Image (cartoon, rainbow, N blue to C red):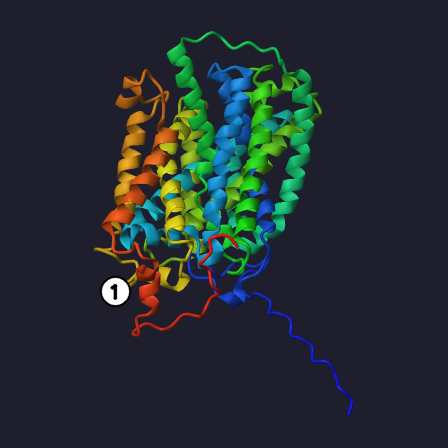
Amino acid sequence: MRSEAIATPAPPEPTADRAGHIETHGADYIPPADRHGRPRELFWVWMSANVIYLYFVIGGVLMLLGLSLWEALAITIVGNVWWAAVGWLAISGPASGTPSVAIMRAMFGVRGSRVFGAGLGVVIGVFYEIINIAFATLAALALIEWFGITLPAGAEWLVLVVVGGLSFAISIYGHATILTLAPWFSAALAVVFVVLAGFVFGAADLAYTAPALEPSEHIAMILLGFAIVASSPLSWGTGADYARYLPSDVSKAKVALWTAVGGFVPAVAIGIVGVLAGTAIDMTDPQLTIGEIVPPWFLPVFLGMIVLSSIANNVLVAYSTGLYAQGLGFRVSRVATIVVTGLGSTAAAAWLLFVAPSFLDTLNSSLELAVTVLGPLVAVYAVDILLRRNRYDGLALAEERRDGPFWYTGGVFWPGVLAMTVATTTAVLMANTTLYVGPLALALGGADLSAIVGPVLGGVVYAALWLTCTPYRDPASRPARSWREDETQPAPVAAPDQTEVLA
């Protein structure tokens, strides 16, 4: 009898997440059959979202604050070190199989997460959607004008709607489509920025001398610049959203690394180009003044890059905002939440562009104040991963009923809520922006320590309350474990051991 080798069947194709098809999953648990991919794919996702014009503007803003060239370069690097925290948060995605908004039920409770997780997430997401739509619309209008096309009155509103529609359409298709398009977006945008960098380096004044500032004002401007730079990585407390489809036994170190590097490299590189441009041109309106240091043929390429990069960034922002909106407790689909939040942000962008007195001043103040919330939120999330040793049960996190594992006391986990309240309040009192100066900032001579004190205080208060005031100090008694041992609940599918945070 002839013996025949038995072929090992190939793993089934994931049916819920295919490029070119609308993703069927939302904020729910991703079962093992739908898990796929490798950590290095995350690099292209974060690269495509962060090869953006905003970092060029932020680099120029540092020069407008009156900082020296070397101070601005140092702040650009140090402020973006927060991308390491974004990478750390991403490891909770494969562990739980859920997006960040679901994981936040562990640190705030089911009801608490609707305010401090989903609620804040929607506000932050819509804020960055507005910025992206505004940048892309301004660039698109400038591009149209460059081609000598005169638009009829009111046509600029149509341009804004088209820009918003393009980014939200890709977000609706979802995770697999984003992963497929990300490398192409990254490559196209990177080429343009490399060419731009060549022109900027050729025009930069490395002997640039900053205007003299009083010592106290100088320190205040350094801290303000740090807050503005840090606001970008701190806004990405959604790393789990793009890592949750990876298998649960994936290397957590690689997930953290590729996520952090994908954001850090373009943020620093483009920020440095913006800083150097600030030594040669007025960065108050770089879309116009960039023509002083680049040849005429490159100007439309530059404007097109702004449009494409803003749309690429908005794809990820709108995707996560839709997931956050699902966490508010309404039984609506991911597609519906993206459409609703997209319409709202498009309308707000129209106000910012065509009604608000100063786009750049409004942008700066918003970025400065955003840190007061973003820093504590990321810190609480990061400490929770550490305290739970990254052991999240995705099926348990999906339970929102009163007898569920993360209902805690009245639907609230007080250590997380109190930590956010204390840290955010303190950070707001320490903020020093162009529109608002907190009393603690005044007492400190104008120094804005919100980007430093907020995250540190949030993490410390959360850890202290967890370790001294909760019954969950022992890992064996934590909610996910106790729920799984409750015989009245269906047993979830067994997952590989995840007792180690990093594989």
Rendered-image quadrant of the N terminus: bottom right
Across and down, in percent, residue 420 comes to: 30, 40
Q: Residue furthest bottom?
A: 1
Q: Nearer the viewer, residue 354 or 371?
A: 371
Residue 502: tell me if it is visible: yes
Q: Which of 468 and 57 is in front in this view?
A: 468
Q: What amino acid is at disc 1?
A: Asp
Instruction: Please tell me whether mark 1 sits on a helix, a strand or a loop.
Output: loop
| Left/right of residue 264 with respect to residue 356 in the rendered view | right
Across and down, in percent, residue 116 comes to: 32, 45
Tag count: 1
Across and down, in percent, residue 233 comes to: 47, 37
Residue 51: tell me if it is visible: no
Q: Which residue lies furthest to the right in this view?
A: 2
Q: Nearer the viewer, residue 342 or 279?
A: 279
Quadrant in which residue 269 is drawn? top right
**Which residue is rendered at x = 32% and y = 35% of the image?**
457
**Which residue is rendered at x = 39% and y = 26% of the image?**
365
Q: Is residue 156 above or below residue 62?
A: below
Q: Is residue 72 above or below residue 310?
A: above
| Left/right of residue 286 with respect to residue 430 in the rendered view | right
Q: Which of 89 and 368 is in front in this view?
A: 89
Across and down, in percent, residue 268 comes to: 56, 31
Say which residue label 1 marks: 403
**Which residue is rendered at x = 40% and y = 49% of the image?**
386
Residue density around tag 1, few if under 14, some if 14–19, many if 20 or more, within 10 Å: few
